[in-house]
Image (cartoon, helix red, strand yellow):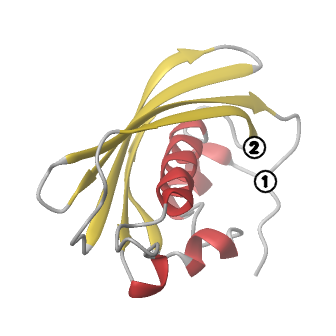
């Protein structure tokens, strides 16, 4: 696998992550140690209060940080993640994630992430740690 060449053509959400695909989650931009994502919200994602379910927001944060980590190494797994929900995602049609690298070590990579709604209101902030794995990514087709 030519990682530098293949990474440019591989959306880690679409290829090999059917759960993220189920949630309408897409990586829209990646750079060295960073990533931006979006989730188009469906009524199915709302909790009984009418805001986007926290599990959907956590998944968006995790996948966004994972996409940023994969700009550094081809295969990672989440070892820790935390999120602070700052306001409910009410009347939300789209959520946007932005991950930034804090540390890129040989084995551990750490990222912070912001989740905002379509109007730019901050919904959540989080931090995720990933472990670099010594194997290529398995892509399901």
Q: Residue 33: x and y, percent?
A: 47, 30
Of 6 and 18, which appears nearest the observer? 18
Please report the residue visible at 61 percent of the width from the left and 56 percent of the height from the top. Answer: 6
Instruction: Tell whether 93 sits left or right of 54.
Output: left
- Can you see residue 32? no
Dot 2, crowdedness within 10 Å: few (<14), some or many (≥20)?
some
State the residue position of label 2: 75
Instruction: Tell whether 112 sits left or right of 67.
Output: left
Does residue 52 sit above or below 86 in this rendering?
Answer: below
Q: Residue 85: x and y, percent?
A: 40, 42
Q: Residue 47: x and y, percent?
A: 46, 72
Does residue 92 sit above or below 130 in this rendering?
Answer: below
Q: Dividing the picture into quarters, in which one does residue 11 lie?
A: bottom right
Instruction: Tell whether 30 sits left or right of 56.
Output: left
- Can you see residue 47? yes
> Are discs 2 and 1 less than 8 Å apart at CB?
yes
Dot 1, crowdedness within 10 Å: few (<14), some or many (≥20)?
some
Residue lying at the far front of the rendered structure = 49
Of 22 and 28, which appears nearest the observer? 22
Of 98 and 80, which appears nearest the observer? 80
Q: Residue 96: x and y, percent?
A: 30, 56
Residue 50 - label: none
Please report the residue visible at 38 percent of the width from the left and 71 percent of the height from the top. Answer: 49
> Quick one: quadrant of the C terminus?
bottom right
Task: Measure the C-alpha gap from mark 2 to mark 1.
Answer: 5 Å
Q: Dividing the picture into quarters, in which one does residue 137 lie?
A: bottom right
State the residue position of label 1: 137
Does residue 43 sit above or below 3 in this rendering?
Answer: below
Of 103 and 138, which appears nearest the observer? 103
- Indicate the secondary structure of the residue bearing disc 1: loop
Please report the residue visible at 31 percent of the width from the left and 61 percent of the height from the top. Answer: 95
- Indicate the secondary structure of the residue bearing disc 2: loop
């Amino acid at each position: 696998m030519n990682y530098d060449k293949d990474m440019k053509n591989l959306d880690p959400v679409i290829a090999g992550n059917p759960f993220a695909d189920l949630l309408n989650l897409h990586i829209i931009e990646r750079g060295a140690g960073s990533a931006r994502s979006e989730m188009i919200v469906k009524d199915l994602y709302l909790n009984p209060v009418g805001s986007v379910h926290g599990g959907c927001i956590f998944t968006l944060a995790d996948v966004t940080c994972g996409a940023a980590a994969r700009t550094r190494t081809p295969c990672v797994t989440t070892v820790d993640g935390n999120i602070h929900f700052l306001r409910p995602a009410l009347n939300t049609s789209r959520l946007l994630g932005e991950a930034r690298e804090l540390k890129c070590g040989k084995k551990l990579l750490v990222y912070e992430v912001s989740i905002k709604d379509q109007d730019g209101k901050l919904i959540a902030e989080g931090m995720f740690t990933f472990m670099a794995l010594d194997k290529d990514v398995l892509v399901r087709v």
